[in-house]
Amino acid sequence: MYKRQKLTIFKRFFTGLANAYGTYNPTTGRARQVKAAVTDQVIVDHLTGRQPYGVYLLVKECTRAVVADFDDPDKFGPVQFLSAASHYGIEAYIERSKSKGYHVWIFFSEKGVTASKARIIARHILDEIEQPLTEIFPKQDRLDTRVEYGNFIFAPLFGALVPHGKTVFIDPATFKPYLDQWSFLESVKRAEEYLLDEIIELNNLQVVKPDIDKTRMRASILGGGYGLPRCARMLLRTGVERFQRVSCFRLAVNLNKVGIPYEMAESILKLWAKKNKPNPKKRIITEKEIIEQASYAYRKGYLGYGCEETAILPFCHPKCMVRKMSK
C-alpha cells in the first residue's frame, strides 16, 4: 500500500468531486472523463505513475483551489501572477505542468470557499498583469442541472512525469523543483474566504450571487430581453454568417452596458457562437477568440453601438431610436 501519510496530504489539496475524475492516455495524450468514485486506489495509481488523475475542483458552489493555466513556457506570466497575488496577501504556487506550461495554484481551506469569489479574484489578477486570456479552473461558478461536472484539471505529482521535472511544484526564484514535494505541500498557506471578501469589496469587483438563476437569465438574454438594443437582440437570436469577431465584440459591449457581469457575458457569447453559420470554408469563432473580444470590450469600457459598422448594419431596425439619434 502507498504510504498513508503522502496519500493523506495529497487528498487535502487535490480532491474535489467524488463521483468523477479525468484521465488521459500517456501515449496518445487523449483525455477523457471517468464516471466513477475517486477512491484511494485512483490516487495511488496517479502518484505511482500507472494512470493520471484529473480533479474536478468544483463541488456544488465551492472549491478548495483556483488555478491559472499558463499554456506556454514563458516564466514571466506565472511570476507576475505570484507577485500580484502577494500584493493582496494571497500566497500562490507554481507547478510545472505535464506539457510546456505552468499551473499557478491558490489553495483555500479544506471546507472550500465560494467558487465565484475565487474565480473573479483570479480573473482580476490576470487582468492586472495583462494576461486576460489565461484559463482559470474551475471554469464555472457552480454545479447545477446545466453543469453537472464542470472541467477537470490534471493533478500534480503524476509518478511517471515527476522524474522528468514535470507536474511538480517549483521554486519561483530558481524555477527548479522543490527537493521534497511533500514537505513543500505541508508548508503551503491557504487563503480564507474573508480575505476574498475584503479584496472584492476594496476593488469593487462584481460577483454573481449563488442564488441567481443563471440559466433563466441566459435564456432571457438570448431570447431577446434585458434592455438590449434591437440589433443586439437579433444578433443573439439568429447568430451570424460573417464578421464573427466584430459581432462578438459589439455584443460584449452591449452586455456590459446593461450590467451583465463579465463571467456571464462570456458564457452567453459561447452559447451565441453555436448559432453562427459561417461559410463552409470558415470556422466558428473559437472560445479563445470570444474571450479575447469580450475581455477587451469589458476592460476598456466601450460605449458605442457600432451602428455604422458593416457587421452591424444588416441587423439595424428602421425604427431603432439609437440609429435615429446617431444620424
Image (spheres, grey):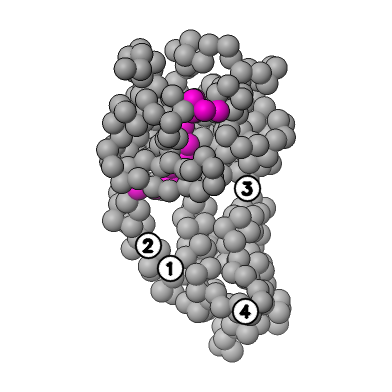
**Outermost residue, bottom direction?**
318
Q: Rounded to the nearest whole Å, what is the CA distance between mark 3 and mark 2? A: 25 Å
Kindly identify the residue that appears in the image at 39 percent across and 29 percent down.
45
Q: Rounded to the nearest whole Å, what is the CA distance between mark 2 and mark 1? A: 6 Å
Q: Rounded to the nearest whole Å, what is the CA distance between mark 4 and mark 1? A: 28 Å
Q: Rounded to the nearest whole Å, what is the CA distance between mark 4 and mark 3? A: 27 Å
Q: Which residue is mark 1?
A: 221
The circle on residue 280 is 4
Q: Which residue is mark 3?
A: 133
Label 4 or label 1, whichever comes before in sequence order: 1
Give the structural element (helix, strand or loop) at label 2: helix
Say left or right for 159 vs 142. Answer: right
Task: Give the amino acid at mark 1.
Answer: Ile
Residues drawn in magenta: 149-161
Foreground mark, 4 or 3, reads: 4
Q: Is residue 217 visible?
A: yes
